[in-house]
Image (cartoon, rainbow, N blue to C red):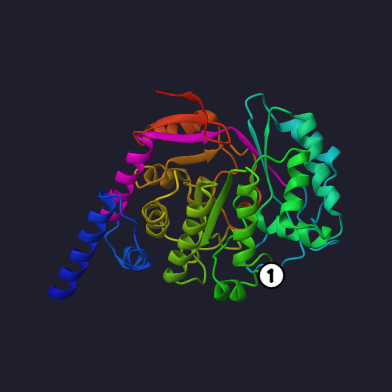
């Protein structure tokens, strides 16, 4: 028993030396960190890395989440947002209907629309293009961060265009960044178990590669906490890290804590706070070529987000207004938050709130 403890302590000390000397962590290092119960040391190391990269600044944005349709041809096992055409609650908004919704809820400080939705095969690709074009024409000063890599792959299939061709048409219409969703866990075994019958690993990465080559700065995620192994989580990060080495086009990595299907689900059906903090801290340590790691309060809650800001996270997301995907499952968190609450939350963690735009340009620093 003493020997095992000594070996674990030695391995953690070796990882700490690597981190402090700016050396890249290996797959084996990542797995060891996930298997370790020394959350405080892992969090401390992640905090050191984040302070080195970002100081005490924590970023947030005034944004709105928009969902044009929940009709989807995919049947991912974890999703409670999707509907089939004709189902009760299924909808597909026209661009004009979305404008009417936004006009009701927008305020002058909103800088970004975060737009995702179902893979609706009952409308043509042009519908998705016009949705962006109409919004951009109506709100020219709001950044269009729209669609996941899985949606881009879907658009390619229904239009017959290459990924580059799809992206060029969307960029011409007003697209300025891609969202990070659709990654889930980049493991074929996981995707088979969870019925992720949409973009596979290479397709997900290739969409982002094409986007980066066209000058788009994009986001990327990891949906953890279901059937994947710890090794699959680490390999997921390495896939993303390797593409970032190639393109340097990702702005932020967003660990997403899996939500149970029902809000009534008990704590045994939810990820533990311990696992959520590990996900933040380990991703900060593994993804040495990323500037930012996001603590997504929609999935982990506002108070745990505060703690995450001391364990590697440098982004507290945004105001959102009304989130639907996690809340169509079992999320118990607020569906949005005010600027004042975000500032309070960040300051409460001993950090400096910084309002940003989509591209991490600083709008205002709240000293």
Residue of label 1: 197
Pick whichever, 219 or 70, lies toward us.
219
In the image, residue 318 above or below residue 189: above
In the image, residue 42 above or below residue 364: below
- Crowding at label 1, few (<14), some or many (≥20) Cα neighbours within 10 Å? some
Instruction: Report if residue 264 lies within the magenta region.
Output: no
Q: Is residue 86 visible?
A: yes
Specify whether 165 is left or right of 239: right
Q: Quadrant of residue 160?
A: bottom right
Q: Residue at x 14, y 75 (%)?
A: 3
Judging from the image, what secondary structure is the residue with disc 1 in?
Answer: loop
Q: What are the residue bounds of the magenta stretch?
A: 41-67
**The C terminus - image quarter:** top left
Q: Quadrant of residue 82?
A: bottom right
Q: Is residue 81 visible?
A: no
List x then y, in percent, for residue 39. Answer: 30, 57
Specify whether 287 is left or right of 40: right
Q: Residue at x 29, y 50 (%)?
A: 45
Pick whichever, 285 or 302, lies toward us.
285
Specify whether 10 is left or right of 177: left
List x then y, in percent, for residue 151. Answer: 71, 56
């Amino acid at each position: 028993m003493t020997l095992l403890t000594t070996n674990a302590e030695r391995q953690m000390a070796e990882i700490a030396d690597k981190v402090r000397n700016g050396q890249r962590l290996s797959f084996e290092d990542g797995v060891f960190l996930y298997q370790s119960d020394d959350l405080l040391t892992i969090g401390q190391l992640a905090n050191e890395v984040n302070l080195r990269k970002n100081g005490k600044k924590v970023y947030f944005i005034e944004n709105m989440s928009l969902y044009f349709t929940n009709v989807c041809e995919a049947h991912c096992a974890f999703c409670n947002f999707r509907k089939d055409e004709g189902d009760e609650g299924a909808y597909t908004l026209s661009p004009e209907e979305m404008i009417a919704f936004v006009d009701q809820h927008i305020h002058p400080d909103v800088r970004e629309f975060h737009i995702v939705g179902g893979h609706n095969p009952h409308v043509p690709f042009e519908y998705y293009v016009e949705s962006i074009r109409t919004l951009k024409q109506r709100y020219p000063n709001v950044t269009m961060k729209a669609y996941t890599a899985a949606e881009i792959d879907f658009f390619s299939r229904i239009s017959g265009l290459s990924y580059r061709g799809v992206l060029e048409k969307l960029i011409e219409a007003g697209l300025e960044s891609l969202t990070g969703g659709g990654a889930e866990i980049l493991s074929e075994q996981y995707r088979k178990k969870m019925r992720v019958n949409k973009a596979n690993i290479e397709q997900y990465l290739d969409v982002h590669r094409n986007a980066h080559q066209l000058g788009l700065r994009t986001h990327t995620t990891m949906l953890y906490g279901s059937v994947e192994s710890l090794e699959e989580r680490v390999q997921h990060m390495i896939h993303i890290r390797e593409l970032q080495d190639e393109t340097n086009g990702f702005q932020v990595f967003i660990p997403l804590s899996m939500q149970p299907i029902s809000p009534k689900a008990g704590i045994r059906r939810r990820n533990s706070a311990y696992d959520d903090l590990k996900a933040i801290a380990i991703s900060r340590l593994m993804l040495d070529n990323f500037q930012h790691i996001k603590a997504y309060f929609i999935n982990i809650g506002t108070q745990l987000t505060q703690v995450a800001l001391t364990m590697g996270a440098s982004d507290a997301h945004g105001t959102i207004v009304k989130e639907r995907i996690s809340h169509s499952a079992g999320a118990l968190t607020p569906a949005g938050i005010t600027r004042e609450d975000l500032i309070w939350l960040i300051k409460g963690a001993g950090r400096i709130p910084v309002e940003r735009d989509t591209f991490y340009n600083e709008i205002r620093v709240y000293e």
